[in-house]
Image (cartoon, rainbow, N blue to C red):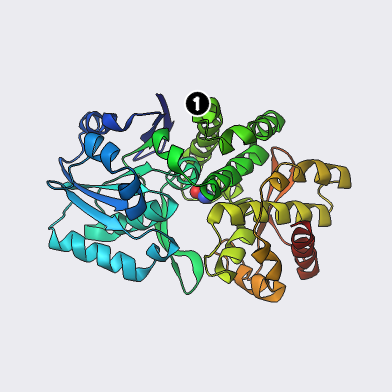
Amino acid sequence: MKTLSVQLSENGYEILLGKDILHKFTSLCKKSSLPKRMFFIIDENVLRIHKKYLQTNLFDEKKDLVCKLPAGEKSKSFKQISELLKVMLENKLGRDTLVVSIGGGVTGDAVGFAASIFMRGIPVVHIPTTLLAAVDSSIGGKTGINFNNTKNSIGSFYQPKFVLIDTTFFSTLPEKEIICGVGEIIKYAFLTGQDFYDSVLAALPLFYQKDFSKTVHLISASINVKTEVVSSDEKETGLRKILNFGHTFAHSFESELHFKIKHGEAVTAGIICALYLSHEKGFITEEQLKKFLYLPKQIPLSATLKKLDKEKLYRVMLSDKKNRDGKIKFVLLKNIGEILLDVEAEKVEVFNAFDRMFKSI
Ligand code: GLY
């Protein structure tokens, strides 16, 4: 088992990563003096698929407080949050209760948000069960829901007490989910350096084969990038913005497709657009562009992206929460490991980036 840590001035925490480590949950809670009363909120699919493993190592469905959350992006809504809060009230949860979220990014974002506003905040622990949630959304305390068809427009920064990542859960993920996680890992490759980029490229077949014993070092390296960034800029006033590489484009695809595209797939398409835009703006040469596109282009993308209307996508981007003075602020690339923040672009440059991505699918 590997232990990584998010170091914050207040509320720092550990991330435990390994195979078959779910049984360590109770001792981790004891070590951190967490409340004994627990409320488990779990993605319905995860409960169905991993019932026996969960019952043996985490909870007893008959005795413990267990609440199922519907799978899919629709759970990131006020309706679902209000239902969760109602169950929490009915069961008389208080600050002496630990909320345990078990599932992918949707579960973690929604449960984290509910925990952050219930009784002005009750403790939460994340047990991410997808590759994407493990390397990104479960770490760093971003919680939220979608509102008015706008991704993550309502939410809070609310750090968990710890994060337990048991790769055992990944073995049953469908290929689409693996692709999603790999999309975020590719993002870290661009943020970090050529060696990481080359290792991710070489490890792609291993990810598809779900060989997590041979890829765990890349999962751990990705988490490490995230913990270092979050440790230095918890509330995204500066450096943390680099984690949004590809995300301004990605969120517009998700909104326009009414969240019928997976986040990680949208991120890969977003990274491709961000690379084309970096080229449009003259930050990278034609030769670099070709080289950098090689990795994200290994990921199969849905042809539905091609049908999207550029004007509509652009309008969504204009409401991105990273914008300032009504201008879209892009995260672009100068080289692998050299990221440019708050870059503005002409509409025609953005449209060209869309067109070039559409053509490449
Ligand atoms: N996924 C971006 C962040 O956590 O800041």
Q: Quadrant of residue 78?
A: bottom left
Determine whether 201 is above or below 311 in the image. above
Q: Classify the position of the N terminus by image quarter.
A: top left
Q: Picture coordinates of residue 173 (x, y %)? A: 47, 44
Q: Amino acid at mark 1?
A: Ser
Q: How many marks?
A: 1
Residue at left 34%, top 29%? Answer: 21
Residue at left 49%, top 42%? Answer: 131
Going by the image, does 97 lie left or right of 52?
A: left
Q: Picture coordinates of residue 223 (x, y %)? A: 50, 36
The single residue placed furthest to the top in the displayed view is 1
Determine whether 172 is above or below 279 in the image. above
CB at mark 1 closer than 8 A to ligand 1? no
The single residue placed furthest to the right in the displayed view is 286
Q: Classify the position of the C terminus by image quarter.
A: bottom right
Kind of element beneath mark 1 = helix
Residue situated in front as seen by the camera: 32 or 340: 32
Residue at left 70%, top 31%? Answer: 198
Asked whether the viewer can see residue 283, the reply is: yes
Q: Mark 1: give few (<14), some (14-19) or many (20+) Cα within 10 Å.
A: few
Going by the image, does 35 lie left or right of 6?
A: left
Disc 1: which residue: 213
Residue at left 31%, top 65%? Answer: 81
Q: Picture coordinates of residue 188 (x, y %)? A: 61, 40
Q: Picture coordinates of residue 37 (x, y %)? A: 15, 44
Going by the image, does 66 lie left or right of 313?
A: left
Determine whether 295 is above or below 42 in the image. above
Asked whether the viewer can see residue 323, the reply is: no
Residue situated in front as seen by the camera: 352 or 345: 352
Residue situated in front as seen by the camera: 332 or 56: 56
